[in-house]
Image: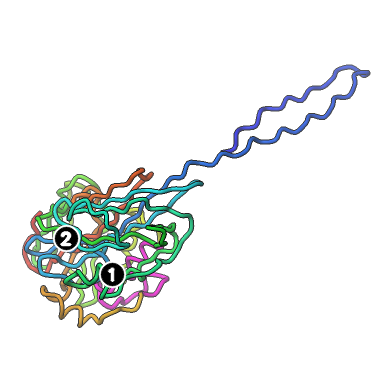
Amino acid sequence: MLRPLPLLLALCACGSNAPSSTPATPIEPAPSTSSTPSYEVHEWGLVRRAFPDRVIVSGPPGISRMEAMPVAKPVLYFHRDGEGVLAIDVEVSMPSGHVVEHWPLTTTTPAPAAIRWADVALVEGHCRGSRYPRSTEPPCNAVSDFCEAAELATVEAEDGDCVHVAGQPFDHLFYRGEVTTPATFPLELALEGDTLRVTHRGRAPIPGKLVRVRRSGAAVSVIEAPSPGASATLPPPSSPNGEGARALADSLRAAGLTDAEAQAFSRAWDVELFGAITASVTTIPPAPATASADTIAAAMPMGPPADDALLYVLPTDDADALATLGFDPPPRVVRRAIVAWIDVALGRPVQR
């Protein structure tokens, strides 16, 4: 910061024969002092809830086993400020599960339920990932279902800063983990005929809106998320599904993501969540699919994506219960935008 300049007092002589004053020598501002570097973290992901109560936390669209339903990765983007070197340690722990895969690879694993990247350098400016794994390479060769790390090039966001791990540049950090014990979600659901009633049993507000999706009709219904302790109803979906994709993207921004990060989520998940989009919602076209929808659906033990589902962004406390993030030194702020994908088509209340 520049130091405030001292107030200059102009001195004048009185009387007709007073000598003229000598012009004051300009005072140069003090040299600027570099600000201490700091950073913030933005994360998006998706967690799918099914019966029995098993969920996973993961990456780009993929396939999974019955006890671990597909969800969007958590992907961590970094935004730094200030000058100078900035190196951090990043740790992810799954208190009720374990880590399945991560990228870039690190050998620092405190426990099966945790992963740690040490001495991560945050470098100003965007960069592309140096490389992503093939299906025959780690971690993909050790994953029994779809390897999400191989899809990470499609979710790079151009407004974050570069992450250097072991001297190699990456756009983001990625992990996927399975939660194997029942998880508590903030919304309690109940079907009343074809109307879905939701009651907010949590303590923190839900960012943005709730989106109910019916893929077979490419339709959605959208309402504002109820406040803690309140209830609301979602009618049968009847609006074009592009409105739902737009509402979900707006909810991600309400949770703190940038436009580019919300668009990365849309590229990864809009087709999986909504089917063919009937209205344009992003300025960036979706990335080409690596497998057809029929191929993915056939490989999923629990069948294709639910024909009646609810989407909303989890409050931070609920995201923390699924996966805990740790940073040293700590960031200014962490923006978590984990989307809950709840199957409604099962036809009975979703248990908390």
Q: Which mark is residue 191?
A: none
Q: Is residue 296 visible?
A: yes
**Of marks 1 and 2, the one in the foreground:** 2
| Label 2: element kind | strand
- Specify the label residue 269 is tagged with: 1
Residue 90 x %, y %: 31, 51
* Residue at the disc numbered 2: 178
Residue 251 appears in the rendering:
no
Up-down: is 30 above or below 91?
Answer: above
Which residue is located at x 9 percent, y 55 percent? 182
In the rendered structure, which amino acid carries the disc numbered 2?
Glu
Left or right? Give the position of 187 relative to 92: left
Residue 276: give x, y in percent of width and height: 28, 78
Query: Residue sitting at 66 percent across and 28 percent down?
Result: 6
Asked if residue 79 lies in the magenta stretch, the reply is no
Residue 280 part of the magenta segment = yes
**Identity, as a three-letter code, of the amino acid under mark 1:** Trp
Secondary structure state at the residue bearing disc 1 = helix
Are there few (<14), some (14-19), or many (20+) residues within 10 Å of tag 1?
Answer: many
Residue 299 placed where, x, y %?
15, 78
Disc 1 + disc 2, Cβ < 8 Å:
no
- Is the N terminus in the top left, top right, bottom left or bottom right quadrant? top right
Lateral position of residue 5 relative to residue 23, left or right: left
Q: Magenta stretch?
A: 260-286
